Amino acid sequence: MYFDGAFSLQGAGAGVLLVAPTGEHLKYVVEMHFPREMSTNDTAEYEGLLVGLRIAADLGVKKLIIRGDSQLVVRQVNKDYQSPLMEAYVDEVRKLEELFDGIQAEHVPRAETTSPITCRSVLHSSYLWNQVPFCSG
């Protein structure tokens, strides 16, 4: 599962790309309507991750590799780093982790996210991409 999120003055959103073992791609887009003072790139990244985890759990996925370009999120999921500001998000990730037999998080440098995930690649043909220019990629 690839995830990405971004925030700008025009809006906030996230993209999720689930890649099945068969090679099928499932793309999801989330537009966020949070107050600006509560929105950051980190919150957008976490929202994308949480959406992806919930969808994967609903689909019955048991083992999941998570890939994203947010070092903060990946390091927190892997328990390598703590940030009190993101504690509520980390707690939600831990709850969702219990629905899986295994989760592995990997950092994908932004330069490498042109395949297959950046907000732009996930949202390219979506209505949101044309209406809410929130993506950083």
Image (tube, rainbow, N blue to C red):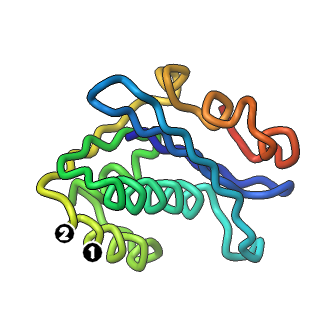
45 horizontally vs 34: left or right: left
Mark 1 neighbour class, 10 Å CA radius: few under 14, some 14 to 19, many 20 or more: few
**Residue 98: mark in rendering:** 2
- Is 133 displayed left or right of 84 in the figure? right
Q: Amino acid at mark 2?
A: Glu
Q: How many marks?
A: 2
Q: Is residue 114 above or below residue 12?
A: above
Query: Residue at 67% across / 68% down in the picture?
Result: 39
| Amino acid at the residue labelled 1 | Lys
Name the image quarter holding residue 94: bottom left
The Cα–Cα distance between marks 1 and 2, rounded to whole angstroms, is 6 Å
Secondary-structure class at tag 1: helix
Please provide percent x and percent y for residue 21: 27, 29
Image coordinates for residue 77, horizontal then vertical, percent: 28, 57
Residue lying at 21% horizontally and 66% vertically, measured from the top left? 99
Disc marking residue 23: none
Q: Which residue is mark 1?
A: 95
Name the residue located 78 percent from the left edge and 46 percent from the top edge: 128
SS at badge 2: loop
Judge left or right: residue 34 versus residue 68. right
Residue 64, how many percent across, how many down? 24, 45
The image shows residue 119 at horizontal and vertical percentages of: 63, 37
Give the quarter of the figure containing the N terminus. Answer: top left
The answer to whether the residues at label 1 and label 2 have Cβ atoms under 8 Å apart is yes
